[in-house]
Image (cartoon, helix red, strand yellow):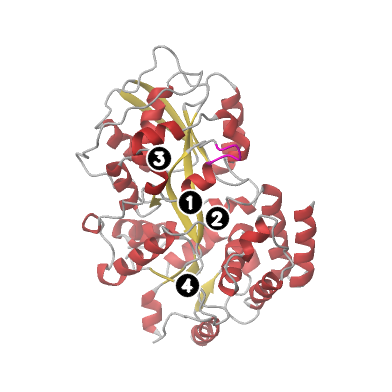
C-alpha cells in the first residue's frame, strides 16, 4: 500500500455492538440494475456477497443482522479484506464472472479508487432516487455523492457515512493535572507545549513518518491561513508555490523546532504509535479526525485504552477542539473530508436487485443510518440523522456531548475533500514534500517548487 494513502486507514472500530434490537425499517424496493442481473433476481430474496476493507467484521455483521430483521430472505456475506491487499484482491475479482455483488469504493486515487473501479459499478442514481425521491441530493450529506460520482455523472456508489479531518483531540485530565487550557491560537499552542515540556510530558504527538497525516496537518494549517487555496491547488487552479501554501509549509516546519511536535517524530507512525500513546495517557493532544469520536464512548474508550497496553483499562473523556488559529485572522476552523467508503453494485452480479436492496437500505434508510450515527465512527450519510444520545453511553456526557454535537454539526456542512480530489501521484508528491521539509532536506519553498513541477507533470 502506498504510504500516503495509509491515511485512509484508521484504528479499529469499536462499534460492533451498536445495533439495537427490533429496528423498525420501512420497505425498500430495489430497482433493476444493468445486464448482469438474471431473470431469477429478486429485490427481496437472494444471496449477496460484499467485499470491503472497512467496516470491521463485527460492525459489518451488525449491519447485516439489522438488515435481516427487515429482509430475512436476503443472505449477505461480508468479507473484510486487509486495506493493503484490497486493490490486489478486488481487481481480478471484478474482472471475473464470480466477483462480489457489492464492493467498497472510495473517492480519490487511493485504495478502492473510484477512478479504478467505476467501470465495474452500475449507476445507482435511479435506486437512490426511488428511495428518497427526485430531491434526494437535498437529503444526504453533499460530500458523499460529490466524491462517488464520475466525471460522466454516474453515481458509482452510495455513501454509508463520512469522515472528516482537521480537528485536534485532547486528554482533558492531563490538562487539568497541570492547570493548563487547550490552545485556541498558534501562540497558545507553543506556550502550552512549553508548559507540558517543563513537566517532562509530551504535549502534541504527530506520526510524521506517515505522509497521509502530515498532509492533514499541512492542509489544516493552510485552511487556517486562507481557506480554499489548498483545494484550488489540488484542482490545478492555483500553484503549490502560492504564498499561502509557502506560509503553511513554513509553519509546518516550525512545529518540529518550536516544541509542538515531539522529537523523533519522523520515526513514528500515526497508527499504531501515536494512537496507542494517546490512549495510554502518554501525550496530551493528537490530530485525528471524526473517526476518533468512537473513543468517546465507554465501550470504545475502554477497548482502545486496553489495546494500548494499559492494564485494568480505565477510560478517560477525550474531547475534540478546533484546530488552533494559526494567524489570528479568525478564519473558520478547518475541516475536510470524504465519504468513508461507498457501496457499489457489480455490473456482473446476477443478484443485482438483492444487492441494490441491501446497499440502498444501509445508505438511505433512517433506521439503518441511525445505527451508523450511533456508532460514532462515521457521520451518517442522511442529513436528517444524528446520534441518539440516549442510546450512546459516553465516558462523560456532560463534557463530551456538546463538543461532539458541535463537531458533527460543523462537519455536516463541509464539502471540501480530504483525499477525494487527489490523484495517487499528487498524493505521493505531497508526501515527499512534507517529509523533505520535516527532515530538513528541503526548504518550504524548494519543496513546494518540486511539488508544483510534479503536479504539472
Disc nearest the viewer among 3 and 2: 2
Check contact, mark 1 vs mark 2: CB within 8 A: yes
Q: Secondary structure at mark 2?
A: loop
Residue at horizontal 58 percent and vertical 34 percent from the top: 118
In depth, the one of 149 and 38 nearer the eye is: 149
Question: Of the residues under marks 4 and 2, which one precedes in the sequence?
Answer: 4
Residue at horizontal 50 percent and vertical 87 percent from the top: 195
Residue most extreme to the left: 22
In the picture, measured across the screen, residue 73 lies left or right of residue 440, that is left
User: Mark 3 to mark 2: distance in Å?
Assistant: 27 Å
Disc nearest the viewer among 1 and 4: 1
Q: Secondary structure at mark 4?
A: strand
Question: Of the residues under marks 1 and 2, which one precedes in the sequence?
Answer: 1
Image position, residue 293 (x, y; %): 38, 60
Check contact, mark 4 vs mark 2: CB within 8 A: no
Name the residue beneath numbered marker 1: 143
Q: Secondary structure at mark 1?
A: helix
- Tell how many labels: 4
Crowd tier of the residue under label 1, counting other residues whose Cα lies within 10 Å: few below 14, some 14–19, many 20 or above: many
Disc nearest the viewer among 4 and 2: 2
Image position, residue 453 (x, y; %): 80, 58
Q: Is residue 343 visible?
A: yes
Q: Which residues are magenta?
A: 149-153
In the picture, measured across the screen, residue 120 lies left or right of residue 71, that is right
357 versus 315 height, above or below: above
Question: Of the residues under marks 1 and 4, which one precedes in the sequence?
Answer: 1
Name the residue beneath numbered marker 3: 57
Which label sits on residue 285? 4
Image position, residue 452 (x, y; %): 76, 60
Amino acid at each position: 500500500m502506498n504510504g500516503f494513502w495509509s491515511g485512509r486507514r484508521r484504528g479499529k472500530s469499536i462499534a460492533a455492538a451498536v445495533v439495537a434490537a427490533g429496528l423498525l425499517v420501512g420497505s425498500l424496493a430495489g430497482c433493476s440494475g444493468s445486464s448482469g442481473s438474471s431473470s431469477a433476481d429478486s429485490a427481496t430474496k437472494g444471496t449477496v456477497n460484499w467485499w470491503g476493507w472497512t467496516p470491521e467484521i463485527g460492525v459489518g455483521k451488525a449491519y447485516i443482522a439489522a438488515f435481516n430483521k427487515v429482509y430475512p430472505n436476503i443472505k449477505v456475506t461480508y468479507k473484510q479484506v486487509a486495506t493493503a491487499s484490497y486493490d490486489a484482491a478486488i481487481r481480478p475479482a471484478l474482472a471475473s464472472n464470480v466477483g462480489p455483488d457489492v464492493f467498497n469504493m472510495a473517492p480519490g486515487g487511493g485504495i478502492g479508487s473510484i477512478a479504478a473501479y467505476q467501470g465495474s459499478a452500475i449507476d445507482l442514481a435511479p435506486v437512490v432516487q426511488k428511495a428518497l425521491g427526485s430531491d434526494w441530493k437535498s437529503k444526504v450529506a453533499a460530500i458523499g455523492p460529490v466524491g462517488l460520482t464520475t466525471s460522466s455523472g454516474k453515481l458509482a456508489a452510495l455513501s454509508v457515512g463520512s469522515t472528516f479531518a482537521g480537528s485536534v483531540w485532547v486528554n482533558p485530565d492531563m490538562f487539568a493535572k497541570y492547570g493548563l487550557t487547550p490552545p485556541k491560537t498558534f501562540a497558545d499552542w507553543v506556550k502550552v507545549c512549553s508548559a507540558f515540556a517543563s513537566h517532562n510530558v509530551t504535549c502534541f504527538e504527530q506520526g510524521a513518518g506517515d505522509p497521509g497525516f502530515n498532509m492533514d496537518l499541512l492542509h489544516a494549517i493552510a485552511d487556517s491561513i486562507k481557506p480554499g487555496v489548498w483545494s484550488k491547488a489540488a484542482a490545478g487552479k492555483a500553484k503549490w508555490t502560492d504564498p499561502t501554501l509557502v506560509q503553511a509549509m513554513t509553519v509546518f516546519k516550525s512545529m518540529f523546532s518550536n516544541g509542538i511536535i515531539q522529537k523523533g517524530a519522523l520515526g513514528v507512525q500515526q497508527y499504531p504509535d501515536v494512537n496507542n500513546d494517546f490512549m495510554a495517557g502518554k501525550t496530551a493532544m493528537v490530530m485525528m479526525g471524526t473517526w476518533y469520536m468512537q473513543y468517546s464512548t465507554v465501550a470504545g474508550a475502554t477497548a482502545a485504552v486496553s489495546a494500548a497496553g494499559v492494564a485494568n483499562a480505565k477510560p478517560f473523556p477525550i474531547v475534540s477542539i478546533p484546530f488552533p488559529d494559526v494567524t489570528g485572522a479568525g478564519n473558520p476552523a478547518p475541516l475536510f473530508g470524504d465519504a468513508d467508503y461507498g457501496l457499489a453494485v457489480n455490473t456482473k452480479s446476477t443478484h443485482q436487485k438483492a444487492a441494490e436492496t441491501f446497499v440502498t437500505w444501509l445508505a438511505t434508510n433512517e433506521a439503518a443510518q441511525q445505527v451508523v450515527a450511533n456508532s460514532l465512527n462515521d457521520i451518517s450519510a442522511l442529513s436528517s440523522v444524528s446520534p441518539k444520545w440516549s442510546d450512546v453511553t459516553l465516558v462523560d456526557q456532560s463534557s463530551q456531548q456538546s463538543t461532539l454535537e458541535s463537531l458533527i454539526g460543523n462537519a455536516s456542512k463541509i464539502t471540501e475533500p480530504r483525499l477525494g480530489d487527489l490523484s495517487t501521484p499528487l498524493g505521493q508528491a505531497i508526501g515527499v514534500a512534507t517529509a523533505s521539509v520535516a527532515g530538513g532536506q528541503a526548504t518550504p519553498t524548494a519543496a513546494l517548487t518540486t511539488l508544483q513541477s510534479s503536479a504539472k507533470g
